[in-house]
């Protein structure tokens, strides 16, 4: 079946602009995660959804970052007033349930802020 | 706080040989899960192997096996009969029971020489 998809695959924007990154999880997966991977680093957790609600948003770096999952499926990560330091690969993952299950990752969106 | 440490940034192995990737971690919880993920240049993270902390038996998946030393908080990955397709970044990761986020190490780049 179809895996996790993310759009766009690459996004170039200017400092100060607003961007939206989209994630389509595997059908039926209730858990959805966003991570950010800077060059040469491992992914860092941003936010976790269980269904429609954000169960853990402790990884969001500041209030410029926001994510939604209104119908419990597709999620959008929104970044306001982008800064050069926001440049990274943003990874989305989904899993069928909680409890240390495998997280299935998408190919990521590479965000470049000029 | 949870931490994952991968102290070797790069390793190389000859095709058909065996290589061991090291990982240490720290957590105050008794209920946790450990993972090795592979990230090829395509960026998509792929699960290699998963270990439940309460299980004493080391996990194996075909050519991949782990050496889980709970008291030492060590979780190394052994790749037998290395293949060219094994070349990638390898990330060790941890999630605690009750917290669904993955905490990743910095990764290790594996090169497989023909």
Image (cartoon, coloured by chain):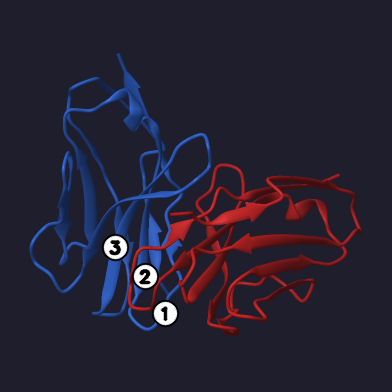
Chain colours: A red, B blue
Horizontal side of B46 relative to A67 (left or right) equals: left
The residue indicated by pointer 2 is B95
Image height check: is A64 above or below A20? below
Q: Where's residue B113, x and y in %?
A: 32, 17
Q: Where's residue A10, x and y in %?
A: 72, 44
Disc ID at residue B99 = 1
Q: Residues within 10 Å of mark 1 (few under 14, many from 20)?
A: some
Task: Tell me the residue at 9%/67% (across/down).
Answer: B56
SS label for mark 2: strand
SS label for mark 3: strand
Task: Tell me the residue at 48%/54% (across/down).
Answer: A3
Pick whichever, A39 or B28, lies toward us.
Answer: A39
Disc on the earlier residue, 2 or 3: 3
- Location of residue B30 (image quadrant): bottom left
Disc ID at residue A44 = none
Residue at mark 3 shares a chain with residue at mark 1: yes
Q: Quadrant of the N terminus of chain B?
A: bottom left
Residue at mark 1 shares a chain with residue at mark 2: yes
Label 1 resides on the chain identified as B
Q: Where's residue A22, x and y in %?
A: 69, 61
The residue indicated by pointer 3 is B34
Pick whichever, B45 or A45, lies toward us.
Answer: B45
Image height check: is A82 above or below A87? below
- Is residue A90 visible in the rendered structure shown here? no
Q: Quadrant of the C terminus of chain B?
A: top left
Q: Residues within 10 Å of mark 3 (few under 14, many from 20)?
A: many
- Is residue B81 visible in the rendered structure shown here? yes
- Residues at badges 1 and 2 in contact (C-beta under 8 Å)? yes
Label 2 resides on the chain identified as B
Residue at mark 2 shares a chain with residue at mark 3: yes
């Amino acid at each position: 079946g179809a895996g996790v998809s993310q759009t766009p695959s690459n996004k170039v924007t200017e400092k100060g602009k607003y961007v939206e990154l989209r994630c389509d999880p595997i059908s039926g997966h209730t858990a959805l995660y966003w991570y950010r991977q800077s060059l040469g680093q491992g992914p860092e957790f941003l936010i976790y959804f269980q269904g429609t609600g954000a169960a853990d948003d402790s990884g969001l770096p500041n209030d410029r970052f926001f994510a939604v999952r209104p119908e419990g499926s597709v999620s959008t990560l929104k970044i306001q007033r982008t800064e050069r330091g926001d440049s990274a690969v943003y990874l989305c993952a989904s899993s069928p349930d909680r409890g240390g299950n495998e997280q299935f990752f998408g190919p990521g969106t590479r965000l470049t802020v000029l | 706080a949870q931490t994952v440490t991968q102290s070797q940034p790069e390793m190389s192995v000859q095709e058909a040989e065996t290589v061991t990737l090291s990982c240490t971690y720290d957590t105050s919880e008794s209920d946790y899960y450990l993972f090795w993920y592979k990230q090829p240049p395509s960026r998509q993270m792929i699960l290699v192997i998963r270990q439940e902390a309460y299980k004493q038996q080391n996990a194996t998946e075909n050519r991949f096996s782990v050496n889980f030393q709970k008291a030492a908080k060590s979780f190394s990955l052994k790749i037998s009969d290395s293949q060219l397709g094994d070349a990638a970044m390898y990330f060790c990761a941890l999630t605690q029971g009750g917290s669904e986020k993955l905490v990743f190490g910095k990764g290790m780049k594996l090169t497989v020489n023909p």
